[in-house]
């Protein structure tokens, strides 16, 4: 059986981890942590595609996804580089194909393209992006996947869709890889998982274990209808992660104003349950549960960024415990 792969997000400011920093200092720390991520053995390095912070809006440093990846490509050698996920309605698909192909070339063939339909309405409003209906955003996502694959593999492309139109468009240089992996993020069961079944190499869900099992069954049903082998689609999971020495430390963090209380404010117990929050033993058991349910890759956001303790401890103490 294929070994389990592990990735980590690079801090970029989206979750307020650089509040109060200068831009130069924040970038220097991001580069340090990217190099550390590679050095301690992670398989891939990720960024978000957002410019508005969460869980509250705060004007502070948030680095843009593709400029960040192009720069990190020059500071790393082995880790694959991806976005979880690129919003298909933030950029023209032709420009997105060009940006992504450029990162693949600059990194020597290490790009992963994550794609999603978009959800953060406040961000759309702030920057003047049309916030289309869910159906139209999903239709744009599907057209974007089809168009990008064609731009990456054909000399010129004509395309006449509901949302995208190309007249002799081309994308050169092509990616170094024959066709970079495309991950589809989101677990909408009627449309998103159908799009994944028809077009994705891998899926990413950020859900609890029970929902992961359920969505796997729904994806399997869509694969049957599409005539595709369910096992050809790799299922991945993208939880928050923070490691503690004791359950008492977990509770203290949950109760702290800027810690778990902020992120799990609606249901702290569910937040801990559905994310990799806990002691090494507790988190190892959670990871193993997902692996046993068919998850083959993980993309982790470490809750103690811009510190590196959880990133390092997960690599040293959790990964060796997991049986594939």
Image (cartoon, rainbow, N blue to C red):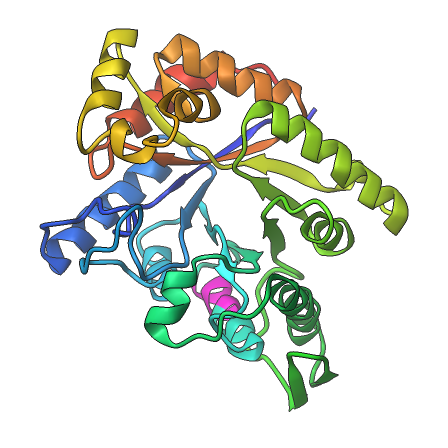
- Residue shown at 41%/26% (left/top)? 271
Hey, which residue is sitting farthest front in the picture?
A: 266
Q: Is residue 295 left or right of residue 121?
A: right
Query: Is the N terminus in the top left, top right, bottom left or bottom right quadrant?
Result: top right
In this orientation, does residue 227 appear?
A: no
Q: Is residue 280 above or below residue 56?
A: above
Residue 262, x across and y down, in percent: 26, 34
Counting from the top left corner in percent of width and height, residue 278 is at 35, 16
The image quarter containing residue 250 is top left
Residue at image x 62%, y 29%? 211
Do we see residue 165 in this rendering? yes
Q: Is residue 309 magenta?
A: no
> Who is closer to the viewer here, 244 or 172?
244
Tell me where residue 232 appears, x and y as whole percent.
Answer: 76, 41
The residue range painted magenta reads: 100-106
Which residue is depicted at the point 18% across and 58% down?
Answer: 60
- 267 relative to 233, above or below: above
């Amino acid at each position: 059986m294929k070994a389990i792969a592990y990735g980590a997000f690079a801090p970029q400011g989206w979750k307020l981890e650089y509040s109060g920093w200068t831009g130069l200092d924040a970038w220097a720390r991001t580069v340090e942590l990217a190099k550390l991520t590679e050095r301690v053995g992670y398989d891939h390095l990720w960024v978000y595609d957002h410019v508005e912070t969460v869980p509250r809006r705060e004007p502070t440093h948030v680095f843009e996804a593709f400029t960040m990846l192009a720069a990190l490509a020059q500071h790393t050698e082995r880790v694959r580089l991806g976005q979880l996920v690129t919003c298909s309605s933030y950029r023209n698909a032709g420009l997105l194909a060009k940006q992504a192909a450029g990162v693949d070339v600059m990194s020597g063939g290490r790009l992963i393209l994550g794609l999603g339909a978009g959800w953060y309405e406040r961000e759309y409003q702030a920057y003047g992006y049309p916030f289309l209906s869910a159906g139209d955003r999903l239709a744009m996502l599907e057209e974007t996947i089809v168009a990008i694959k064609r731009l990456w593999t054909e000399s010129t492309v004509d395309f006449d869709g509901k949302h995208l139109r190309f007249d002799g468009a081309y994308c050169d240089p092509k990616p170094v890889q024959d066709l970079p992996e495309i991950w589809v993020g989101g677990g909408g069961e009627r449309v998103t998982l159908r799009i994944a079944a028809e077009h994705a190499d891998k899926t990413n869900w950020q859900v609890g274990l029970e929902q992961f099992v359920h969505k796997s069954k729904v994806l399997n049903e869509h694969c049957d209808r599409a005539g595709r082998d369910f096992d050809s689609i790799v299922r991945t999971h993208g939880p928050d992660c923070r490691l503690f020495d004791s359950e008492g430390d977990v509770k203290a963090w949950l109760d702290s104003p800027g810690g778990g209380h902020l992120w799990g404010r609606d249901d702290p117990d569910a937040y801990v349950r559905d994310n990799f929050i806990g002691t090494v033993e507790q988190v190892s058991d959670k990871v193993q549960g997902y692996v046993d349910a068919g998850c083959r890759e993980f993309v982790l956001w470490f809750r103690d960024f811009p510190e590196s303790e959880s990133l390092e401890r997960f690599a040293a103490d959790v990964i060796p415990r997991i049986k594939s």
